[in-house]
């Protein structure tokens, strides 16, 4: 994976984790805060309920205490009831006879209404019944018809004498019923502290399935948080509802989110800045360096690499520059050498041929026109030596052109390759007997000059053979187990082909390969039942054998004045086989002669041949 | 060696006097009219005066190359057979050159005479055979010099091969003596 990709992934990961942690903690805090708020408002609701309960209790106590003042006659309450109405927040009061009829009725109602009520039986009302049973009881709130006003009635037992036993306590001499408006001053003064600009209180009761508002909420909020608490008063319930403005809380949370978000953005921004900085100082420099290497590989030694992000990079940049310069110098030297070699080669060959044609012509003329046998023989020797020289010149030419296309491998059908070479060389040496055994279906892979190389090996075997009936055997085997070198070409030849007279426009224009742009060893080119492996072409002769020094100079890599091969043919073979990714071997034949083996990359049948 | 064309006239062109003289000396034994010149312009001058049957033309010459001389000869419409005689290795550019045959120095005596005879023969045939021989000589020279892979890749060479095959098919139908002519022609070693 590219450094840049890795770095980007690391950076993005850090950013994601960081964002996750920050946003997660904000969310957690938010939930916590809301939960706290909810708890607080529940607490408030609870407290408020207790306070209201205590107020209701106070009202009960007022009625109970008043009822507990002994009166002589429950029917003669002329003084009694007005006193009650005056001294307590109750606006009206009734006395009830033990039989449940209203005996007296006083307070803030029209007289005729009060008088009409006297004598009515009211013991069917639960609070009255409870009071006549000796309990202090509270009625259900009741709305005054046609108004928003609600009224609560509290009933307490009346005794003519202080009850001296439990039995008489449950058997009162009547009941006192006080009616009181359920309003702010009578019941909810304690709720005043709860009412703030951000909080409101409401109290409801549900009578016969209908919700009765006892304390109306003093304000409403767009977004709110609500808590309810029920207040149980012996058989009935009031619901206290606390509503709190949520917008303040949310504003706070939004603020928090904004602050945290900004911090996060700042941190992420810093990370991005760090990434950019790292990219500029290191990654981009590394990429430029890689580009530089690629340029060098392409042979662009003047590629200017300027790395300035850090001292280290500057030093690398300088080192790279020196390296490129060194390579450029070497390349130039190499080119010059190659050019020299090329000119030498061409001029030498041309002139050898030209001058040889003079020597040849005149020697031939001498041979033809002389009657002197010795002279004729001398002329023949000149001609033969000239022929050798021409052959040598041709060999040099072959070597030159063999590596014109050293960057391309070609697949040769082994059978055809060997047969063609045998035909050619057999024509040259009619006395030689060349046998060959080549299996079908083997494709040998090598430089286009592989055929020339094989011809050279065969020529060698025939030419130097001193046997009466020279015998040469060519044998090809294929080993699917061996694996050829996959990496090819072994060196990066960006411009291995030196300028040559062949490299004219005409020659270049037409070098479109027959699909030969892919290596013949490419697995995609294999037919079914085929695999890659190594082919071994062995050429055995019964001649005098190749003197050791002839092939030792090949592996030594250089020749000395004293120790050098006698010709160029073996060099050609050695180079072509080596450049093809193969190996050249020499062995002695039995009983005499030598075996030259060319081991080359090949494709062939899976089972081998 | 047949001497039926001993009356033929031959001009040898080479900037190296000894080369030209050598060939002339050689050919003098066979043909009555053999002359030598040592430069391109001189060749054109001589050809303007005298007609020759066959011209042996060196490729590499100062002042005016053999290739240029060949062009000039064809432009001026001189009716003579041109055999390039050269130490220069042939390249695919020879495909477009209007010569009749191509021999590489040094040339064996037999090949020299055979090539000249062939041209003298061809002179009497129609232009298809001339074309066929010229194309075949190019193929022979290139095949001797270039690797098979290179030849396979070269469009000019492939075009030449196709054209030769076509000419061969036509000529085979027309000429009884075609096979003989071809076998003589292809036995010449041009390199």
Image (spheres, rainbow, N blue to C red):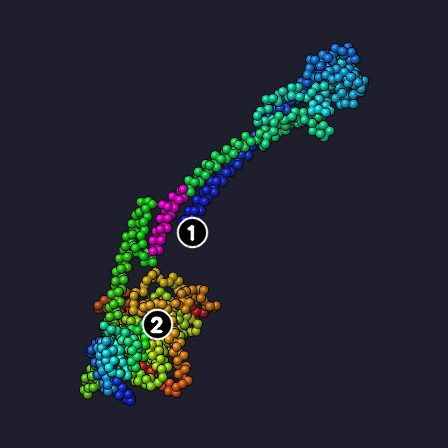
Residue A285 lies in the magenta-colored region = yes
**Residue displayed at 34% across by 67% down:** A508
Q: Chain of mark 1?
A: A
Point 32% across, 62% down: residue: A495
Measured from the top left, where is residue A11 in percent x and y? 43, 44
A179 relative position to B142: left or right: right
Q: Is residue A589 visible?
A: no
**Segment colored magenta:** A273-295
Give the residue pinned by disc 2. B147
Question: To which quarter of the image does residue A368 belong?
Answer: bottom left
Total numbered badges shown on the rendered structure: 2
Counting other residues with Cα less than 10 Å from the Cα at mark 2, is it few (<14), some (14-19), or many (20 or more)?
some
Q: Position of residue B167 (x, y in %)?
A: 39, 80
Q: CA distance from mark 1 to mark 2?
A: 44 Å
- In this rendering, is residue B72 above or below A601? below
- Identify the residue at horizontal 33%, vertical 62% (top origin): A493
Give me the residue at 39% from left, 71% from top. Answer: A412
Left/right placement of residue A71 relative to residue B75 reads right
Q: Which residue is mark 1?
A: A1
Q: Is residue B188 above or below residue A503?
A: below
Q: Is residue A92 left or right of residue A21?
A: right
For the stretch drawn in magenta, the main secondary structure is helix
Q: SS for tag 1?
A: loop
Above/below status of B119 relative to A345 = below
Classify residue B157 by image quadrant: bottom left
Q: In the rendered view, would you say B6 is above or below A234? A: below
Taking the magenta stretch, the answer to whether it contains residue B102 is no
């Amino acid at each position: 994976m590219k450094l840049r990709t890795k770095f980007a992934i690391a950076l993005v990961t850090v950013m994601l984790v960081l964002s996750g942690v920050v946003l997660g903690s904000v969310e957690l805090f938010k939930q916590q805060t809301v939960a706290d708020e909810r708890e607080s408002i529940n607490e408030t609701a609870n407290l408020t309920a207790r306070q209201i309960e205590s107020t209701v209790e106070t009202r009960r106590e007022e009625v109970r205490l008043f009822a507990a003042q002994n009166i002589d006659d429950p029917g003669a309450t002329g003084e009694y009831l007005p006193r009650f109405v005056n001294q307590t927040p109750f606006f009206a009061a009734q006395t009830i006879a033990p039989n449940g009829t209203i005996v007296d009725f006083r307070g803030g109602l029209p007289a005729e209404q009060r008088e009409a009520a006297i004598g009515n039986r009211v013991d069917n009302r639960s609070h009255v019944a409870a009071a006549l049973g000796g309990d202090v009881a509270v009625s259900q709130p009741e709305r005054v018809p046609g108004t928003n006003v609600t009224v609560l009635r509290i009933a307490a037992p009346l005794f003519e004498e202080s009850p001296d036993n439990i039995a008489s306590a449950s058997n009162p001499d009547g009941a006192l019923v006080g009616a009181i408006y359920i309003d702010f001053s009578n019941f909810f003064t304690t709720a005043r502290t709860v009412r703030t600009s951000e909080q409101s209180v409401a109290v409801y009761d549900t009578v016969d399935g209908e919700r009765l508002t006892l304390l109306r909420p003093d304000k409403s909020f767009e977004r709110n948080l609500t808590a309810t608490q029920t207040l149980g008063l012996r058989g009935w319930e009031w619901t206290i509802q606390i509503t709190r403005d949520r917008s303040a809380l949310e504003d706070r949370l939004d603020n928090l989110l904004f602050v945290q978000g900004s911090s996060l953005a700042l941190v992420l921004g810093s990370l991005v800045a760090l990434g950019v900085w790292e990219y500029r100082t290191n990654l981009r420099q590394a990429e430029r360096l890689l580009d530089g290497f690629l340029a060098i590989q392409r042979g662009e030694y003047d590629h200017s690499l300027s790395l300035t992000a850090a001292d280290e990079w500057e030093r690398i940049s300088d080192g790279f520059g020196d390296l490129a310069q060194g390579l450029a110098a070497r390349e130039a030297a190499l080119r010059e050498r190659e050019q020299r070699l090329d000119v030498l080669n061409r001029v030498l060959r041309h002139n050898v041929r030209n001058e040889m044609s003079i020597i040849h012509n005149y020697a031939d003329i001498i041979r033809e026109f002389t009657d002197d046998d010795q002279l004729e023989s001398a002329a023949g020797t000149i001609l033969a030596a000239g022929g050798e020289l021409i052959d040598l010149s041709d060999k040099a030419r072959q070597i030159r052109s063999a590596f014109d296309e050293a960057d391309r491998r070609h697949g040769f059908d082994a059978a055809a390759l060997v047969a063609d070479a045998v035909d050619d060389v057999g024509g040259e040496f009619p006395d030689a007997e060349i046998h060959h055994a080549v299996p079908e279906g083997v494709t040998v892979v090598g430089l286009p000059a592989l055929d020339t190389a094989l011809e050279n090996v065969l020529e060698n075997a025939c030419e130097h053979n001193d046997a009466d009936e020279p015998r040469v055997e060519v044998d090809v085997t294929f080993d699917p187990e061996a694996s050829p070198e996959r990496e090819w070409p072994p060196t990066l030849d960006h411009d291995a082909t030196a300028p040559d007279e062949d490299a004219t426009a005409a020659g270049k224009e037409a070098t479109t390969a027959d699909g030969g742009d892919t290596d013949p060893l490419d697995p995609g080119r294999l037919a079914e039942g085929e695999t890659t492996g190594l082919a071994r072409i062995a050429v055995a002769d019964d001649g005098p054998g190749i003197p050791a020094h002839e092939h030792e100079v090949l592996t030594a890599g250089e020749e000395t004045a004293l120790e050098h091969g006698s010709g160029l043919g073996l060099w050609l073979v050695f180079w072509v086989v080596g450049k093809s990714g193969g190996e050249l071997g020499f062995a002695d034949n039995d009983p005499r002669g030598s075996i030259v083996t060319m081991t080359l990359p090949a494709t062939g049948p899976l089972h081998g041949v | 060696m047949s001497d039926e064309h001993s009356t033929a006239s031959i001009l040898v062109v080479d900037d190296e006097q000894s080369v030209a003289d050598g060939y002339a000396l050689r050919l003098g034994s066979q043909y009555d009219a053999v002359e030598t010149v040592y430069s391109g312009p001189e060749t054109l001058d001589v050809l303007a005066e005298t007609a020759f049957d066959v011209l042996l033309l060196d490729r590499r010459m100062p002042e005016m190359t053999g290739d240029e001389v060949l062009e000039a000869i064809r432009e001026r419409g001189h009716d003579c057979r041109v055999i390039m005689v050269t130490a220069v290795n042939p390249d695919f550019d020879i495909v477009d050159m209007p010569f009749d045959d191509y021999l590489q120095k040094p040339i064996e005596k037999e090949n020299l005479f055979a090539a000249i005879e062939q041209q003298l023969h061809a002179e009497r045939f129609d232009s298809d055979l001339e074309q066929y021989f010229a194309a075949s000589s190019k193929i022979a020279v290139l095949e001797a010099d270039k690797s098979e892979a290179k030849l396979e890749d070269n469009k000019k060479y492939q075009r030449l091969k196709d054209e030769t095959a076509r000419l061969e098919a036509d000529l085979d139908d027309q000429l009884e003596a075609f096979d003989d002519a071809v076998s003589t022609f292809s036995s010449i070693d041009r390199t």
